[in-house]
Amino acid sequence: MDRLRSPGGCPWDAEQTHESLARHAIEEAYELADAIEGGTREDLREELGDVLLQVVFHARLAQEHPTDPFGIDDVAATLTDKLVARHPHVFGDVSVSGADEVHANWERIKGEAKTRASVFDGIPAALPALQRAQKVLSRAGSAGVPYRAEAGVGVGPSLLAIVARAEAEGVDAEGALREAVRSLELAVREAEANRPGAAS
């Protein structure tokens, strides 16, 4: 990546910015999700590499900042510090009863480390609506303000009530919907293939 960004390297890579690459990071994350859900091991390996490329590319760009440069080693060090701080039951002397307590500790430690005016700060606005709804519901519950669905409401609030049920049952709403849509798609494809006169 250093060679690609340096003089004599790739003209396209040399023109990129954090902003121009942002959409690629999102696309690669979705391609990784597809590989996880229905790809081969080779697909998974390739898509993990593509996600890693985004990290390496952004870290190389960050080295060029005139007043606050950092590189891939700094990114890795920051991640390492975060993992150690958020896992005191592994790297410290804290005892936990299970995964639920680990999650609660993670959120508490995260809240102490980041100064936020609201529990909703830090939830990306660009998340898919279903995924963002579940994140908002989770944070609302942790703030002691659980969502209560109202009867006889419109489509939007009804969808939110379904997401609230998923959150209460520990189900990934986005993943569950993707799986249901994938099952429907497979059923329709099978029906298409079995239609009289369908191409073989």
Image (cartoon, rainbow, N blue to C red):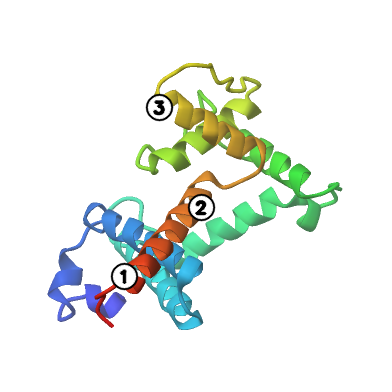
In this rendering, is residue 16 above or below 116? below
Residue 138 x/y as whole percent: 59, 34
> Label 1, label 2: how many angstroms apart (C-alpha)?
30 Å
Answer yes or no: is residue 120 visible.
Answer: no
Which mark is first along the chain, 3 or 1?
3
Q: Residue at x 40, y 27 (%)?
A: 156
Secondary structure under the numbered disc 2 in the rendered image: helix
Residue found at x 31% / y 70%: 195
* 22 with respect to 170 (left or right): left
| Mark 1: few/some/many CA within 10 Å (<14, 14-19, 20+) | few
Instruction: Check disc 1 and give the amino acid type.
Output: Arg
Relative to the observer, which residue lies in front, 79 or 144?
144
Amino acid type at image mark 3:
Gly
Q: For this view, does 124 lie left or right of residue 118?
A: left
Q: Residue at x 50, y 80 (%)?
A: 41
Tell me the kind of residue under disc 2: Gly
Instruction: Name the residue carrying label 1.
Output: 195
- Between disc 1 and disc 2, the foreground one is 1
Q: Front-most of 122 and 136?
A: 136
What percent of the width, then of the height, locates residue 6? 21, 75
Task: Decide if residue 75 is in sight here.
Answer: yes
Q: Quadrant of the N terminus?
A: bottom left
In what element is the residue under mark 3? helix
Q: CA distance from mark 1 to mark 3?
A: 36 Å
As drawn, the label of residue 175 is 2
Q: CA distance from mark 2 to mark 3?
A: 19 Å
Evaluate if marks 2 and 3 touch, with contact meaning CB atoms under 8 Å apart: no
Image spot of residue 35 (x, y percent): 44, 70
User: Picture quarter containing residue 46?
Assistant: bottom left
Residue bearing the label numbered 3:
156
> Compared to 14, does 100 lie above or below?
above
